[in-house]
Amino acid sequence: MAVDAIGAARRLAPRLAARAAGHDRDGTFPVEDFADLRRAGLFGLMVPSELGGVGASFAEYAAVAYELARGNGATALVFNMHASVTGALGAVDEQTAEALGVPAEALAARDRLLAAAAAGSWYGVAMSERRAGSRLSQLATVYEPVDGGYHIKGAKTFCSGAGNADAYLVAARSAADPGVVSQFLVPATLPGIEVEPTWDALGMRATSSHDLHLDVRVPADTLLGGVEGLALVIAQMMPHWLIASYAAVYVGVAQAAVDAAVEHVNARGLGGLPAVRARIGRADSAVAAARLVVDEAAGRVDAAPGDVDTNRWVWRAKLLAGTTAAEVAASMLEAAGTSATRRGHPLERLYRDARCGSLHPATSDVCADWLGVAALGGDPDRDTSTPRW
């Protein structure tokens, strides 16, 4: 990479950590963190170099996300959404575009969006809905063609960075054919977009993952790919951006919990207790193992995206990262003792943030079920009573 993105993320992490407690306490969005990310050029991380970006691989993204999460998991989580949008857009090469029937004008619109990201714009994701979760086939938000574009109407939940992003990736079903699911990159400045402040959660409190209400007309070129019905196809082609991109974030949160516990234990003189040392030793090993699995998955994504074996590693990475983060943070809280449970202590925040890892889609139970079906010789994307996507 021409830009040392991993080094930049590593240097930014202490600054993010210094602000994390205040944003967690107040439930406010870390605006200063994102100004730092912009200045560092990280909004262009997944943008091809010919469009002004860094041109990072998925493995390089994972390394950046891990470093950012060691500073503030909430900031890294929102950054993950932006990286997912730009990474998926940037991964559609000419061969893939031809196979999907993407017209030349849609590729030009894609390039404009990516160039804008490299210049400092950042994108949120508005996919999940109440009662539907993140399953694209179950969405209630609908769209229909109108003169010059489309009309989108519906409500989204868990929209990280709501009210702060420059545009939102909105998934919606065709009003004419509910089996057709498309995605639009909707500019935040258009009339008909309303943020409802609903986010007051256990962990990741600084993500501002509020509800987003849409009753908006969008230009034709906001339809990603220029072809209706690509959302489910892209999800199956690039599951790493929907699943494993979270994994590096939560491994970073787990490592931050170990770091905080070591600092606390040393400050309190508790390192002489064998039980405390054993907990830290087990946590150190668990985080290292989870990071190796994430790295393996990321390397396979770069070498053979969408491959059967690659996808199994993608699901393994998400499962292991979520469960490891929760277990490690809980153990580090016990190692540190009751004083670490006080509001404002880093471990108290990290414990709550880490607990969210298993809940992000795909949840740990869904990941385990997918892997179980695959191990039994079935098709884990189709051999289920409930639609996987």
Image (cartoon, helix red, strand yellow):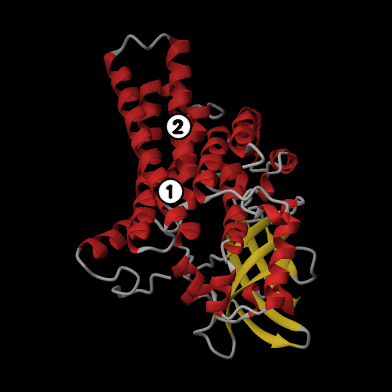
Q: Nearer the viewer, residue 116 or 48?
A: 48
Circles 1, 2 touching at the beta carbon (< 8 Å):
no
The residues tagged by marks 1 and 2 sit, at their Cα atoms, a distance apart of 21 Å
Residue at figure coordinates x 40%, y 39% from the top left: 291
Question: Looking at the image, which residue sits at the far bottom?
Answer: 176
Residue 277 point in image, percent of width and height:
32, 18
Report the amino acid beneath label 2.
Answer: Gln
Q: Nearer the viewer, residue 237 or 186?
A: 237
- Residue on which the image places disc 1: 299
Image quadrant of residue 113? Answer: bottom right
Question: Looking at the image, which residue sits at the far left?
Answer: 376
- Relative to 242, does residue 231 appear above or below in the rendering? below
- Relative to 124, does residue 344 appear above or below in the rendering? above
Q: Nearer the viewer, residue 386 or 221?
A: 221
Residue 71 point in image, percent of width and height:
57, 33
How many labels were placed on the picture? Answer: 2
Number of the front mark, 1 or 2: 1
Answer whether residue 194 is visible to the viewer in this image.
no
Disc assigned to residue 137: none
Report the amino acid beneath label 1.
Answer: Gly
Residue at figure coordinates x 78%, y 84% from the top left: 148
SS of the residue at dot 2?
helix
Residue 27 point in image, percent of width and height:
64, 43
Residue at figure coordinates x 46%, y 68% from the top left: 237
Quarter of the image for the C terminus: give it: bottom left
Quarter of the image for the N terminus: give it: top right
- Residue on which the image places disc 2: 255
Image quadrant of residue 268? Answer: top left
Answer whether residue 76 is visible to the viewer in this image.
yes
- Relative to 354, does residue 244 appear above or below in the rendering? below
Q: Is residue 334 left or right of residue 139?
A: left
